[in-house]
Amino acid sequence: MGTKVLIADDEPNIVVSLSFLMKREGYDVLVARDGVEALETIRAERPRLVLLDAMMPRLTGFDVCEAVRADENVRDTRILMLTAKGRDSDIARGLGAGADAYVTKPFSTRDLAARVRDMLA
């Protein structure tokens, strides 16, 4: 069984490109299209890492991050926030919510793959 990585994003093009990248890196890919689905998937599937968009329907990435950190069963899940929200205040909010890393879109796939490898090492 490979390492599970959850892609939580409501933008289909991002999901497709991230899925391709993560599968190429050898990870088992899970997908959630909104915040509620992301939280349910994290609790049910226990991915090692979540690539989490900040702005999603139903629950934001910030809300998902805070809920994961508050849940002792899944709080050690690694979270990389991947979002177009790149202001200093957004980054501070993401890290304050408990994200392990924060990457702004657009991003380099090579840099992202390297960051994921580092976070899972």
Image: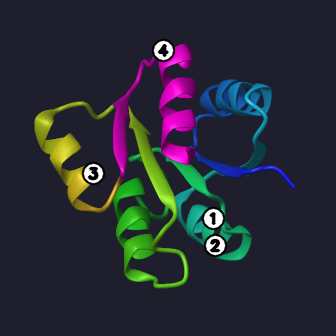
Which residue is label 2 attached to?
Answer: 40
Quarter of the image where one finds residue 110:
top right
The mark nearer the N terminus, 3 or 1, is 1
What's under tag 1, amino acid-wise? Answer: Glu
The disc labelled 3 sits on which kind of residue? Gly
Q: CA distance from mark 3 to mark 1?
A: 19 Å
Task: State yes or no: residue 115 in magenta.
Answer: yes
Name the residue furthest front: 121
At 53% from the left edge and 25% from the top edge, which residue is drawn?
Answer: 114
Q: Is residue 78 above or below residue 108?
A: below
User: Circle 4 is placed at which residue position?
Assistant: 108
Residue 28: x and y, percent? 79, 46
The residue stretch that appears in magenta: 100-121
State how far apart marks 3 and 4 are (Cα): 20 Å
Specify whether 88 is left or right of 22: left
User: Whole-Å distance between the Cαs marked 1 and 4?
Assistant: 26 Å
Where in the figure is residue 37, as x and y percent of width and height? 63, 64
Indicate the secondary structure of the residue bearing disc 3.
helix
**Residue occupying the point 66% across, 60% down:** 47
Q: Residues within 10 Å of mark 3 (few under 14, many from 20)?
A: many
- The kind of residue on which mark 4 rests is Ser
Q: Nearer the viewer, mark 1 or mark 4?
A: 4
Q: Residue furthest bottom?
A: 72
Give the class, few, some or many, for how many residues have Cα within 10 Å of label 1's Cα (few <14, many ≥20): some
Q: Work out how far the residue at label 3 is from the one at label 2, CA to CA, in angstroms.
A: 20 Å
Please name the residue that numbered disc 1 is placed on: 37
What residue sits right under mark 3 in the picture?
94
Residue 47 lies, with reference to residue 39, above or below; the image says above
